[in-house]
Amino acid sequence: MLNRDRLDAIVNNMKKLGLTQILVSDDNAVYYITGRKIDAMERCGALLIKDDGEVHAFMNRLFCFEEMDGMTMHYYSDDENPYKMIAENLNSGAVGFDKNWASKHTISILTERKDISPVIGSDAVDMSMALKDEEEKEKLRHAAKINDMAMDFAVSNIDEKLDEKELSDKIEEFFEKNGASRDIQLQYVCYGKNAAEPHHGAVAGEKLNEGDAVLFDLWAPINGYWCDMTRTVFYKKCSDRHREIYNIVKNAQKAAIDTVKPGVKMHDIDAAARKVISDAGYGEYFITRTGHGVGMTVHEPPEAKSGNDTIAEVGMCFSIEPGIYIKDDIGVRIEDLVIVTEDGCEVLTKYPKELIIVK
């Protein structure tokens, strides 16, 4: 069913951006508007949205995309040219194309019409998708609860007999048993110095040693919405220096979370975390952004990073995940998802952040 509230928000965003027509082809975006996924793969599937609220859908008959009220349907078969259909329904001038659409689709449409010019049109949809409605918030909360359970499972199953990949596989299996869709991503399990690589994937043969930090970055799609949380614990013992680094990161994360509220710019949230780490003398080791949006994808707008003037609004969901990464020594990251509320933020993930030493 066409979600009129979401469509109206997208049309309003189009007007703010000066866009009169956009083509929406991203599968998640199509689902966001229509409640249906198409999985077009190499074929062409798209919605045309105009600034008067008119909507056209161009779908291969193989997609089994049924007609719905409020949308003009255009079906094609594999021996027909969908690009000609789309081109015939475009107005002359600028056309907003999806940022992730394969260039063969864009070029094929441009070939059919010489009086149109391509611009990026995804912002109109992204701006709407960034503001979660109540249904989406509940899905994110549910996913976060599963994430808390998965983190407890991960920490409880730390065992020097298991290498990174073996423990990662156990965690992925736990996720799937609790409602997560199978995903090509590995659950990040990082032992010792491997935690100093922000995107270290679990590796077979990497063994755990006494005194190692163990960094878990656990994420999965559950009922179409992602969870994402990181915790760093220690195996059997923790040096004073590593304890100091851990507490600096924990304080930096708290500072950033405390900064979140409507009207604050995303770069100020990043700056709050960065100041704590820099003041402690570890600024050069904070080499990532502080956060990224999460929803139907695990990385989406808005980003909490330097230079991003986007203003936090009620309903936005993003991660807060500062870290310190010292090559050949240690990496510490603590991450939670937050939803912006009227007077601050709701922290979705609840797993403890006090330093944990697994005996």
Image (cartoon, rainbow, N blue to C red):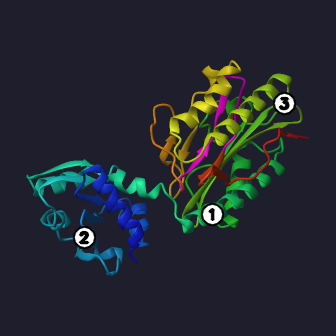
Q: Nearer the viewer, residue 322 or 263?
A: 263
The location of residue 202, given as percent across then percent down, is 66, 42
The C terminus is located in which quarter? Answer: top right
Residue under pointer 3: 211
CA neighbours of label 1 inside 10 A, class few (<14), some (14 to 19), many (20+) = many
Determine whether, in the image, residue 319 is placed left or right of residue 164: left
The answer to whether residue 242 is visible is yes
- Answer whether labels 3 and 1 touch (C-beta < 8 Å): no
Determine whether, in the image, residue 57 is placed left or right of residue 203: left
Q: Residue 159 appears in which quarter of the rendering?
A: top right
The answer to which of marks 2 and 3 sits earlier in the sequence is 2
Report the Cα–Cα distance between label 2 and label 1: 36 Å
The N terminus is located in which quarter? Answer: bottom left
The answer to which of marks 2 and 1 sits earlier in the sequence is 2
The location of residue 144, given as percent across then percent down, is 67, 58
The answer to which of marks 3 and 1 sits earlier in the sequence is 1
Q: How many marks?
A: 3
CA neighbours of label 2 inside 10 A, class few (<14), some (14 to 19), many (20+) = some
Residue under pointer 2: 54
**Image: magenta residue range:** 315-335
Residue 35 in the magenta stretch? The answer is no
Judged from this view, the residue extending furthest toward the top is: 281
Q: Residue 64 appears in which quarter of the rendering?
A: bottom left
Q: Secondary structure at mark 1?
A: loop
Residue under pointer 1: 180
Q: Is residue 143 above or below residue 117?
A: below
Q: Secondary structure at mark 3?
A: loop
Determine whether, in the image, residue 66 is placed left or right of residue 266: left
The location of residue 321, given as percent across then percent down, is 63, 39
